[in-house]
Amino acid sequence: MTKKYVYLFQEGKASMRDLLGGKGANLCEMTNIGLPVPPGFTITTEACNEYYSNGENVPNGTWDQVWPALAEIEKATGKLFGDKKNPLLVSVRSGAKFSMPGMMDTVLNLGLNDDTVEAVVANTQNERFAWDCYRRFIQMFGDVVLEVEHYNFEQILETAKEKQGVHFDSELSAESLKWMVSEYKKKIERKTGKPFPMDPRVQLELAVLAVFRSWNNDRANVYRKINNIPHDIGTAVNVQSMVFGNMGSDSGTGVAFTRSPSTGEKALYGEYLMNAQGEDVVAGIRTPQPIATLAQENAEIYQQFADICQRLESHYRDMQDIEFTIERGKLYMLQTRNGKRTASAAIRVAVELFREGVITKEEAIMRIEPEQLDHLLHRRMDDAAKVQVLAKGLPASPGAASGKIVFSAEEAERQGELGEKIILVRTETTPDDIRGILAAKGILTSRGGMTSHAAVVSRHMGKPAVCGCDALKIDYSLGLFSIDGVEYPQGTIISIDGSTGRVIKGEVAMVDPELSADFKEFLDWADEISRLKVMANADTPTEATNARDYGAVGIGLTRTEHMFMDPERIPIVQQMILAQTLEEREVALEKLLPMQEEDFYGILKSMQGLPVTIRLLDPPLHEFLPHSEELIVEITKLKITKEDADSLREKEALLRKVRALSELNPMLGHRGCRLGVSYPEITVMQARAIFQASARLVKEGCDIHPEVMIPLIFGVDEFLMMRKLVDDTAADVMREQSVHIHYKVGTMIEVPRAALTADEIGKVADFFSFGTNDLTQMTMGLSRDDAQGTFLPTYLEKKVISSDPFVVLDRNGVGKLVDMAVKLGRSSNPTLGLGICGEHGGEPNSVEFCHIVGLDYVSCSPFRVPIARLAAAQAVVKNKK
């Protein structure tokens, strides 16, 4: 038995989106609930997929089902396809399961030829209308189906307007349109070597094939990639009887939303034009009227339309985006779909639909994509602003900013102190740039990926960043960068959009974020539903307060190394590193101790009543020293000038230490707990700072919960050695201060061996926090920044991997280690706390994985806390048993 490839609109329903596509399923649904829909049929997505699997041949039996379906349209309309007296004209449109506006092809007015156009003239008594439809059809068919480039037809159109002396298409006479039709056909025959097809059945067959082909065009492939739409679902083809809004003053066309797509306000929102076709509404040739004006122009049609809109919203239980046409006083519905909306509108609509009793809280939270919330939490570019895009990089940190170009952290800080708005432009940033990053409104780099230093720090600070913009050619010596040969010197004003990766010329108007009462209520619902707690990564009291304001229930990661990068502290840190003896090192540590104590005091106080997880020093020590190349330059200058012998000796000693500390692979080198094993006094100093700050707060009556985290262990013996240092220091401080401090000591699981031996470590640890950035690097054998800037894009393009593993957690590999460590750890310690503090903690797919494997919390940048809260709730709904 032949598979069914063709469904009349009355045979389908809304639930058949996989088979009929979104547009086809909704046309079927509207037909079956009794709305005025022009009759038609849908060729299924299965036919499209089999077309490709059969070497671009339509599956057997398809046309045998198309022609009887077309006969049903003829019966319903009283018109005949290709008839010389009363011809049926149809539209042929694409329609995948997921909306892909403008990405695939459409053909309108199909069925016109030299004979049927005369029949349309006779039936409408409107010669200009008929010939305008014919020239539009040939132009669209020639472009979409016969692949004659669009500009060929535009040249003929411009010539016709010049000959007649008019400016707009709508002013062309019937005679001009007839001349254009003749010229169009000549052009097509010259370009293709064949005459324009006059047989309507041939036209229909060719148009269906063109829509199938358009599924695989470049823009459709790119759109699917950007929006994570599968490439193997195919498109349906909708063949529908044409209705015309340009048949006179009693005809028209328009688009409307059942609620405002900008604000979510419950009111009809849209526009229409009388005596026009759909493309005229968006072409800007005539100014459309607000939909409310239709009430004065035709009260009966308006009321019918308003009633249908309400009916559709009630039926679909969501805001609808509706296309309609009025033909000679009769209303037709051409499409309905869930309307695209801004993030703020989406939240308002979801909250109000719940209040109206239309949807449940669980349904409401599933109506918002977590990433949409980004748009509410950062300044963004005004959608109405006209922009000139210079280049595009990776959208590394959301938000937008304008400012003057500067090329060094020092200059950024200097100009920032003068009140200048600046954009820090670097090949890539390092921890040394932290002051410049703080001073900048945004960061732009020519290298680095989504988890590069610039990206991670910018997201952490809530600053916009565009990274890996390889079109950027930076010349530090000349103080400029160039794009496509055009130079932009320091001081030039540019804008960056960290949500899209755009680099834009000049200053762009910005819109500040506004968090509504609906937003807060919506996230409260998410918290009611979710099991995972959401904590934040924060290194300062200000960041901790921001995190708390966004709903974080603790700090899951405080990175102590960021505190060492203050310019006032760097000389002391370097003194500690350069010390030749324990005594010399302890002198430097004594200076750092009160500074660290104040750091921890501020963060713990701002998070009273909530846990604060403080990671001990993690990066290799050489990161706190100057680059060897810079030192070599300085030493060479001193040798040439012979001005300062003492300074020369200091620089040469520093260079020797830098070279002694340098490692071939520092990410796997002398860092994390390994520093504590080699230099236990560093660990003791940090632990003392934590507990002295805690003791002060306990005496002040504060409810604090410090948690000390040991980084980069690969086995239980390392952990026990570090834990003893922490526990002994805590005991000393509590005895000295006569206070009791409730604290925990745990570890990061970021080395594969630690995950494999988690049962041993779990016996003696209070908690695990998975550092999935390093765990991904070590499990997959990838250097994060190098891979993202070189071969990972190729791997993604060639589908070797489905997503960047530093953005979306690799469930099949890294995820198995996490799952194994969770089970092993809990088997030996049922009360073991479990969380994640890598960049994955704020990525929705990764948050869902954390829910599935049974973690207690995720921790992410403060500005991603709302996203993680929503993702945690959605994980519960998606994974209900």
Image (tube, rainbow, N blue to C red):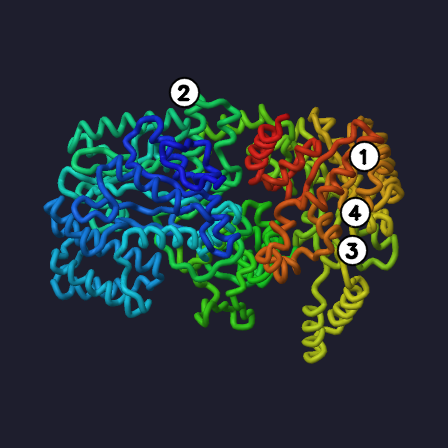
Mark 2–mark 1 distance (CA, rounded to whole Å)? 46 Å
Q: Disc 4 residue type?
A: Pro
Q: Provide the secondary structure element on which disc 2 rests.
A: loop
Can you see residue 421? no
Q: Residue furthest front?
A: 1
Q: Which residue is mark 3?
A: 668
Q: Is residue 106 above or below residue 324?
A: below
Q: Position of residue 820 (x, y in %)?
A: 78, 38
Q: Which residue is mark 2?
A: 356
Q: Disc 3 residue type?
A: Leu
Mark 1–mark 4 distance (CA, rounded to whole Å)? 14 Å
Mark 2–mark 3 distance (CA, rounded to whole Å)? 57 Å
Q: Provide the secondary structure element on which disc 1 rests.
A: helix
First reached walking from the N terminus: tag 4 or tag 3: 3
Q: Residue furthest left?
A: 125
First reached walking from the N terminus: tag 1 or tag 4: 4
Decide: marks 2, 1 in contact (CB < 8 A)? no
Q: Which residue is mark 4?
A: 752
The foreground one among 865 and 421 is 865
Give me the residue at 21% from left, 47% from top. Answer: 83
First reached walking from the N terminus: tag 3 or tag 1: 3
Q: Provide the secondary structure element on which disc 4 rests.
A: helix
Mark 2–mark 4 distance (CA, rounded to whole Å)? 51 Å
First reached walking from the N terminus: tag 2 or tag 4: 2
With 307 as the anchor, is 460 left or right in this view? right
Mark 3–mark 1 distance (CA, rounded to whole Å)? 24 Å
Q: Provide the secondary structure element on which disc 3 rests.
A: helix
